Amino acid sequence: MKTDYLKPAELIIPLSLLAFIGTGITFINSVFNPTTRWGILAALSFFLLSYRRRDVHGVLRHPLFWVVLAYALWGLMTVAWSEVWQISLVKSLVFFWVTITMVIAGYSWVMRHDRVCAFDFLWLFTVFALPASLIGQHEELATGAFVYAGLTGNPNFLGFVLAMAGAWLMWRAYLARRQNRRIFVLYVGLLTLALYYLILSHSRSSLLIFLAMALGLFVGLGKLRKRLPYVLIFSMLCAAAYIYSPAVKGFLTQYALKSSLAVLAQEERGGLWYSREQIWEESYDLAMRGGLFGGGYGVTIGEDFHGEIGPTISSGQYGREQGNSQLAIMEQTGLTGFGFYLMLIAGIFGVYASGVHVARIEMDRVAIGLLGGAILGLLGQSVFEAWWVAPGAAESATFWMLLGALLGVTRRARLAVSQQRSSKVMRAQHGAAGQSPAGVHP
């Protein structure tokens, strides 16, 4: 059945996700800005509570929800000892609001649409992500490297939106591969274009997301074992090209180090993580100071605010770049909060693994594999970007909606298995009832 995605009830979920990424895209950030996104999120909350209560109850019954709730409530409790309680109060409440709403929204989208529409909450995301990459400008880093920022003004953000647009394009290419060759070629071409500009952005963490999704797609297709020899051969060829080709080696070295080789040689700098080392060292020191309870959710330990709190509660006004989500969690919510975080990650892995194991329909397995790859890729990206403690970040909103969609797909896969078992039992009962005792004729 064809769905009209321009209807308000169908548009509200994709639009709410666009509201979070739109703040970083220059040609739409006048509409989707740090203020209007909260209005759209409020409209989404009203829609879910008023018209999708069944989906709200479905998420509330899932065990993983209670882990998320415990983590959110612990962040709220840190207000009691926070160094700046106003920031901790506002940001912990925003985290709770964004997290719960986006999880329910992702779950609701999957449960009320056909299997083929599992990723279509990303369609509007993709429509604006691709044009943002086609034109724009190169930016020169302090390290001497030039990276492509498109129309986002931030190469890492451009890489993120292109990587996530790749999830929808991969899904659509998968659906079209046996039905319409021309449409399949179109989606593969768009996916290649997204990957091309992703590479130009030099966003290594976003490339990690893209690769994790591709791996998840192969896991869902059940072709990882069959393709493993080809992957190994390809890896060996790449290693040989890196060793014996100066041009390839130079390109990959510059891409990995995000700097021109001349600058590295002149300033005697190097190492894969040199651009993050100073940030991570400071974050590590403050994470150790966080102790068991932390310095307060959303707060930089030891930061002098002079009693002035910005009206937008933006980290750019009162904090610093933290560069690593895990260290930021320990700094703000302590080892206790980090424990809740580890429980949540373990629960996500459990949902993903059990979903792949239980699903009997290929489309469900592919959706679980692709969603799981996107989520795990974002978790990997969070090692280099501290979006986990920034509830208004585009990465945060996207992560929680993807998690809700994963819960929805795994639940639908389990329901399909239950229905198959019920059908087999009913057929067996009807078959037994239709047999007549020996020697007795109706």
Image (cartoon, grey):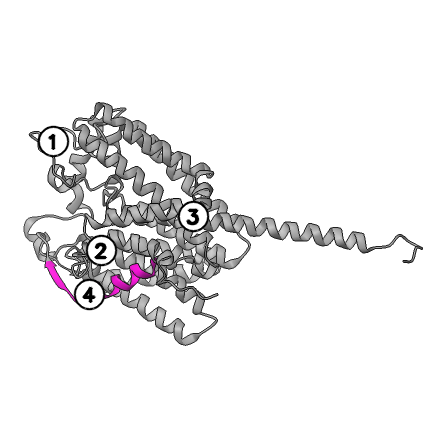
Mark 1 element type: loop
Q: Is residue 187 magenta?
A: no
Quick check: 312 left or right of 69?
A: left
Residue at the (40%, 66%) spot, across then down? 173
The quarter of the image holding the C terminus is: bottom right
Residues shaded magenta: 122-139
Q: Which residue is mark 4?
A: 247
Separation of residues labelled 1 and 4 (CA atoms): 46 Å
Nearer the camera: disc 1 or disc 2: 2
Quarter of the figure with residue 30: bottom left
Q: Which residue is mark 1?
A: 303
Q: Report the predominant secondary structure element of the magenta stretch.
A: helix
Q: At label 4, which amino acid type do we have?
A: Ala
Q: Position of residue 268 (x, y in %)?
A: 9, 48
Mark 3 element type: loop
Separation of residues labelled 3 and 4 (CA atoms): 56 Å
Q: Earlier in the sequence, mark 3 or mark 2?
A: 2
Few, some or many residues within 10 Å of mark 3 (<14, 14–19, 20+):
some
Q: Earlier in the sequence, mark 3 or mark 4?
A: 3
Separation of residues labelled 2 and 4 (CA atoms): 37 Å
Quick check: 100 left or right of 321?
A: right
Q: Which residue is mark 3?
A: 52
